[in-house]
Amino acid sequence: MTAGHRARPRGYPRTVERAEALDTFLAPRGIDIVIELVVGAETVMERLGLRARRHDTEAAVTSRLELYDHNTVPILSWHEARTSLLRVDGDRRADRVAAELRRRVDATMVALPVERDLESTVPLLSNRDPDRGEPPQ
């Protein structure tokens, strides 16, 4: 990564060990925000069923949810102690989830210290155009 560029890995890291390795790799800058989309198991099953993929069987999805509970849930506490952890209700329509994400991420990024390179970060997380003088709301 070069200065001014941001990575937004989805679903990574999934274990505390990988989070520690990522934290070391990103030092001294670190991670600004971690987002957890909170979605109930019933909604997960329903949404994955809409994808109609062969490997999205009920048993496979149940297994993945168990892995999430075992491996990923502990990492949320690890991140919460080190950075901004935003929990967002994902059991809603996509447009409402997106609107809340945009609002909360923008608010969190504005609150970060200036040395976090806010000018290069906000445009990646927002549809606002800083070149036209549109500040985050």
Image: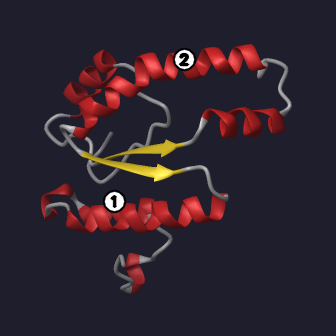
Q: Residues within 10 Å of mark 2 (few under 14, many from 20)?
A: few
The location of residue 47, given as percent across then percent down, is: 74, 40
Q: Earlier in the sequence, mark 1 or mark 2?
A: 2
Quickly name the residue at label 1.
121
Nearer to us of marks 1 and 2 is: 2
Q: Is residue 115 left or right of residue 69?
A: left
Q: Residue furthest bottom?
A: 133
Is residue 55 shown above or below 101? above
Horizontally, is 34 left or right of 25 in the view? Answer: right
The tag on residue 66 is: 2
Q: Quadrant of the C terminus?
A: bottom left
The three-letter code of the residue at mark 1 reads Thr
Residue name at image x 26 percent, y 68 percent: 110
Q: For label 1, count other residues whose C-alpha is less than 10 Å away and answer few (under 14), some (14-19) or many (20+).
A: some
Give above or below for 128 relative to 97.
below
Locate residue 103, reporting x and y percent.
Answer: 42, 68
Q: Secondary structure at mark 2?
A: helix
Frontmost residue, 29 versus 17: 17
Considering only vertical position in the picture, is 1 above or below 130?
A: above
Residue at coordinates 43% horizontally, 60% vertically from top-left? 125
Instruction: Please name whichever residue, 27 or 82, is drawn nearer the observer in this view of the structure.
Output: 82
Q: Report the disc number at residue 129.
A: none
Viewer-proximal residue, 90 or 95? 90
Mark 1 residue element: helix
Coordinates of residue 121 in the picture (x, y in percent): 33, 59
Q: Position of residue 106 (x, y in %)?
A: 36, 66
| Residue at 59% from the left image edge and 38% from the top image edge | 40
Res. 17 image quadrant: top left
Q: Residue at x 42, y 18 (%)?
A: 71
Q: Amino acid at mark 2?
A: Glu
Separation (CA) of disc 1 from disc 2: 34 Å
Residue contact at pointers 1 and 2, CB within 8 angstroms: no
